[in-house]
Image (cartoon, grey):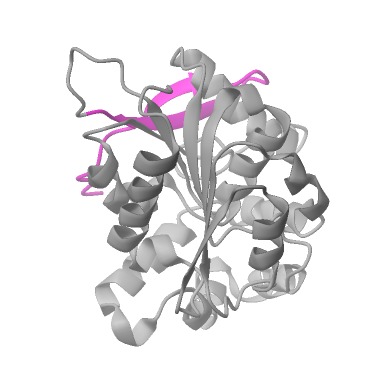
Amino acid sequence: MNDRHTLPRFTTTGDGLRIAYYVDDFTDPWIEPPSLFLLHSAMSSSRRMAAMVPHFARRFRVVRVDLRGHGATDVPRGDQELNLERLTRDVLDVMAHLEISKAHFLGASGGGYIAQQLAIHHAACVSSILLFASRPGFRDSNGAGWIPEMERTGLRAFIARTIEERLPVGQVSQAQVDWFLDEMSRNDESFVRRFVGYMTTQYWMSDLARISCPTLIVAPRGDAIGNASAYQEMHRLIRGSELVTYDQGHHNITDYLPDRCAHDALDFLLRRASPAGA
């Protein structure tokens, strides 16, 4: 594979899983930069967030984590945990490995679930959260119906059939669509079904009122995956949060609008978050 991106590093989580992460840091060597974690969506990997990295890496130590069972991270055995607490703990394990006590967290879709969990349950570790097309769980969605179709047709064929919900096909190149499909289908199909199935049982809207850190919510208008009306309720519950709405109906905004997403994220970070908070 011709990979022009940063190569992965590895550490081991508390339950013995090898997890992959990537660090991009072009800050001045005489400063201790704040850290910004980029957390990718489900059925994905950190490679899909690479286009956003250059916008941040001059000001932040940028850390991308391949979530449990995704990308270059090991697929957990059937007897190993797969729940929000363990997924959150994986990120905390990477932080401990890198000796990072506090960070900003930018999450796309399912990656934003983990950012929310960190802000709710581990507030001392969180400087801010930035949520892109990420609601509080996946129970209010049609995700449960995805699993039998994945089993029947395979992961790549399923994603191809639903591609219009994810990307504006007429506005992006066919090469990007093909790469998007290839990247998602690199993941273990049985694990993807397990992951999606678990997430369709989870919803924590009422817990959002516990979030006290600066929070940015970026919502694609008319998001076809899940309940798009949830974004307004999130904004109401998270005190002091900012809601930015894109006039887009496709879910994966960090894939097809990476520069716009990174611009809005960086603007928020520079306005709302302490530049010295690591």
In the picture as drawn, the residue positioned furthest to the bottom comes out as 170
Looking at the image, is 15 positioned above or below residue 209?
A: above
Q: Position of residue 97 (x, y in %)?
A: 48, 14
Does 263 sit left or right of 125 as displayed? left
Residue 21: within the magenta? yes
- In the shown orientation, is residue 207 left or right of residue 112? right
Query: Residue 206's x, y, as percent?
Result: 82, 51
Residue 167, picture quadrant: bottom left
220 or 78, which lies in front? 220
- Residue at image point 29% right, 70% down: 176
- Residue 224, placed above or below residue 102: below
Q: Between 174 and 29, which is closer to the camera in this rendering?
A: 29
Residue found 34% across the figure and 66% down from its top: 257
Q: Position of residue 80 (x, y in %)?
A: 73, 32
Residue name at image x 73 percent, y 47 percent: 208
Instruction: Find residue 278 and report its image quarter.
Output: top left
In the image, which residues are magenta? 1-25
The reply, left or right, for residue 152 in relation to residue 168 is right
Q: Is residue 114 left or right of residue 103?
A: right
Q: Residue at x 68, y 73 (%)?
A: 229
Answer whether residue 170 is visible to the viewer in this image.
Answer: yes
Q: Position of residue 76 (x, y in %)?
A: 65, 36
Q: Is residue 258 above or below residue 81?
A: below
